[in-house]
């Protein structure tokens, strides 16, 4: 095993550590060195398998859908926060049965759902494939299940299956 499997990552982590722990002391310098050497070595040991994108066009379509959904969600959350939305707002949890099992695709789905204002990936059970999602404005659980499966899961399965 090489001492520096990812030299740029090592340098970046050490530098970030020093910047976050200013002023530089011998102890913080030693810890920066430890972080810079340990984290990339652990990452190297994980040996993540390469990701293959099988449908680049679907990836571009998904990026467009996510962008539109994020803009819409920002507007909806702003209306809720500013009290401009009429009617009673109800938060809730929805359990979504996922067919998706590819780890990288699941990671992207978690990023999409958590980065979209008003939703939060809470839990995923890999044995059952169930995702627990918290929704800020929860009018209908079935609508959320269809939305996640149709708008995000199906394209992710096409891209990475």
Image (tube, rainbow, N blue to C red):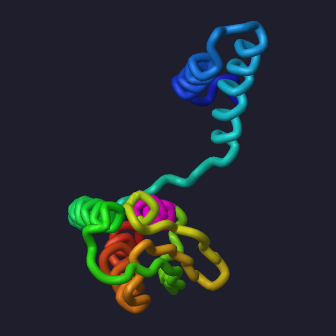
Horizontally, residue 29 falls left or right of residue 102, namely right
- Depth check, front residue: 26 or 21: 21
Q: Residue at point 64% right, 77% down?
A: 125
In this figure, what is the number of numbered marks? 0
In magenta segment, residue 133: no
Q: Quadrant of residue 6?
A: top right
Main SS of residues in magenta: helix
The x and y percentages for residue 32 are 68, 20
Residue at figure coordinates x 27%, y 73% from the top left: 85
Q: Residue at x 37, y 70 (%)?
A: 156
Q: Image quarter for residue 44?
A: top right
Q: Residue at x 37, y 82 (%)?
A: 88
Q: Quadrant of the N terminus?
A: top right
Location of residue 94 in the rendering, given as x and y in whole percent from the top left corner? 50, 83
Question: From what the image shows, is residue 52 above or below residue 24?
Answer: below
Q: Quadrant of the C terminus?
A: bottom left
Which residue range is magenta in the image?
A: 104-112
* 80 versus 91 height, above or below: above
Q: Nearer the viewer, residue 9 or 137?
A: 137
Q: Is residue 111 magenta?
A: yes
Q: Position of residue 38 (x, y in %)?
A: 72, 31
Q: Is residue 56 visible?
A: no
Q: Can you say whether 73 is above or below 3 in the image?
A: below
Q: Is residue 40 visible?
A: yes
Q: Is residue 19 left or right of residue 149?
A: right
């Amino acid at each position: 095993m090489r001492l520096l499997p990812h030299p740029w990552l090592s340098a970046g982590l050490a530098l970030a550590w020093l910047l976050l722990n200013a002023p530089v002391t011998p102890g913080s310098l030693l810890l920066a060195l430890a972080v810079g050497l340990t984290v990339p070595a652990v990452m190297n040991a994980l040996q993540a398998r390469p990701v293959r994108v099988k449908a680049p066009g679907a990836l571009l379509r998904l990026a467009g859908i996510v962008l539109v959904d994020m803009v819409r969600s920002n507007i909806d959350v702003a209306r809720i926060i500013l009290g401009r939305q009429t009617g009673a707002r109800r938060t809730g949890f929805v359990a979504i049965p996922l067919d998706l099992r590819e780890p990288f695709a699941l990671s992207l789905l978690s990023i999409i759902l958590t980065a979209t204002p008003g939703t939060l990936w809470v839990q995923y059970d890999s044995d059952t494939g169930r995702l627990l999602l918290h929704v800020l404005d929860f009018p209908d659980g079935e609508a959320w299940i269809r939305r996640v499966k149709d708008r995000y899961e199906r394209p992710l399965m096409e891209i990475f299956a």
